[in-house]
Image (cartoon, rainbow, N blue to C red):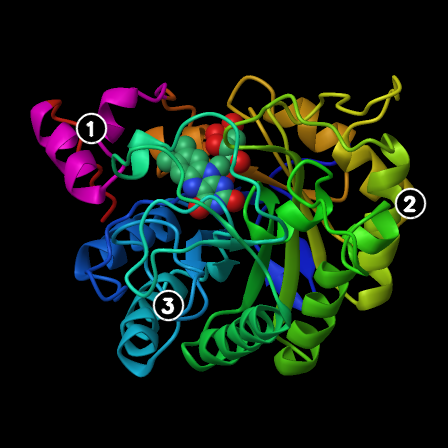
Amino acid sequence: MSSAFDDFELKGHKLENRFVVAPMTRTSADKKGKPTELMGEYYERFAKGGWSMIISEGVYTDRQASQGYENQPGITDAPQTDAWKEIVERVHKHDCKFIMQLMHAGAQFQHNEYTDTPIAPSEVKPKGEPLDLYGKTDGWPEVKAMDETDFDAVMNGFVGAVNRAKEAGFDGVELHAANGYLLNEFLSDYFNQRPDQWGGDMAKRMHFLELVVKAAKSAAGDDFIVGVRLSQITVTDSDYQWPEGEDAMIKVVKAMEKAGVDYIHTTDTDVMRKPFKGGSNKSLGDIVQEFSDIPLIVNGGISEKNYEHVAGHYPNALLAMAKTSLANPDFPIRIKSSEPIRQLDFAMLQPTATLENEWKWRDENDAHIELD
Ligand SMILES: Cc1cc2nc3c(=O)[nH]c(=O)nc-3n(C[C@H](O)[C@H](O)[C@H](O)COP(=O)(O)O)c2cc1C
């Protein structure tokens, strides 16, 4: 029986267990996208808390249209890169791996220091309303459909970001192709209505992602990890389904394997959910396990109640947790020593998900975590 406390090898990197902190946007960098000292404290706390790997919040990749939120960190210049370097050192001190999530906002665009106009596959706004959690904005702005210059800028942004993440000392990057951000929008027949070579059936809709993966891989070189995060659902549309059902996921997974990705990270409302149109009995993670040999990270609703079951169902997967890790930055240590597990109090993230608000909540609730 495989245990969540088993060690795990990811592209030659030895992980001490299978517990991973899932990416979480905290909008706590400075105005210029430079990470802060408090962010270092935040990430180091997970590393001290026994997680074998942390995936950072979504980090913007270029100075055109990739930033989506105010105070989102970037990886576009030397000051940002140097500030990340210090955070990486703090995490690595505790033998914890650190992956930077690279995120282009696409149409999910609430604030950008460099432009007022989002770019996306087509002139399509997200469903629903912007997320107050990341800063209040009134409605979604009008979207520009990407032209060839935009394709080049996005691609250069991702490649430059891979190089800088490497320079900062990260163990790898995760290309964010989930939750309705740009790379995910290409996969979606709601967002991607292009009549050209970038739109149509899944083979065409996934082509841009394939090219970005290949470019990232060639910038990464031999040891640096390049993963991809995938979902069907988006942050404002938890019902979205690809029209081709499970065949769409099978196609994407096979293409990702061919392009050389080092892991696939699936995310859904629940890690066991069978989300496909047409009544498949498989989850996103099941498809990766069945149709490829790519290492898997699964995410969605993992907690102290089900982690053992999830570890058994996905024997070759890492288990990524967002809300559970926020409530318990020392979750692996707590489980090992049978200490109580806390439930997330959403008041911690109000009125926005900044670290400052979390720290204030911890002061008021006597809930600071001492890990020394
Ligand atoms: C505060 C917060 C911020 C998040 N930011 C990101 C992000 O930057 N990138 C991402 O891929 N997912 C992000 N997510 C989604 C989580 O990574 C995860 O997929 C989701 O919360 C479901 O997992 P859970 O049940 O373990 O919480 C965020 C979630 C939360 C709660």
Q: Nearer the viewer, mark 1 or mark 3?
A: 1
Assign the magenta stretch its main secondary structure. Answer: helix
The magenta span reads 342-364
Q: Nearer the viewer, mark 2 or mark 3?
A: 2
Return the residue nearer the eye: 22 or 198: 198
Q: Amino acid at mark 2?
A: Phe
Left or right of residue 57, residue 254 in this image: right
Label 2: how many Cα within 10 Å (few below 14, some 14–19, many 20+): some
Return the residue nearer the eye: 125 or 270: 125
Left or right of residue 227, residue 291 in this image: right
* Mark 1: C-beta under 8 Å from nearest atom of ligand 1: no
Left or right of residue 357, residue 269 in this image: right
Task: Check residue 291 in the rendering and tell me which mark sits there, or answer none.
Answer: 2
Residue displayed at 39% across by 51% down:
68
Instruction: Please provide percent x and percent y for residue 347.
Output: 23, 21
Q: CA distance from mark 2 to mark 3?
A: 34 Å
Asked whether the residues under the numbered discs 2 and 3 touch, taking CB atoms below 8 Å apart as contact, a structural biologist would say no
* Residue 354 lies in the magenta-colored region: yes
Residue under label 3: 88
Residue displayed at 19% across by 54% down:
38
Q: Is residue 124 above or below residue 327?
A: below
Tell me the SS state at disc 1: loop
The disc, 1 or 3, on the residue closer to the chain's N-terminal end is: 3
The disc, 2 or 3, on the residue closer to the chain's N-terminal end is: 3
Q: Nearer the viewer, mark 1 or mark 2?
A: 1
Tell me the SS state at disc 3: helix
Q: CA distance from mark 1 to mark 3?
A: 28 Å
Quarter of the image holding residue 12?
Answer: bottom right
Residue under label 1: 351
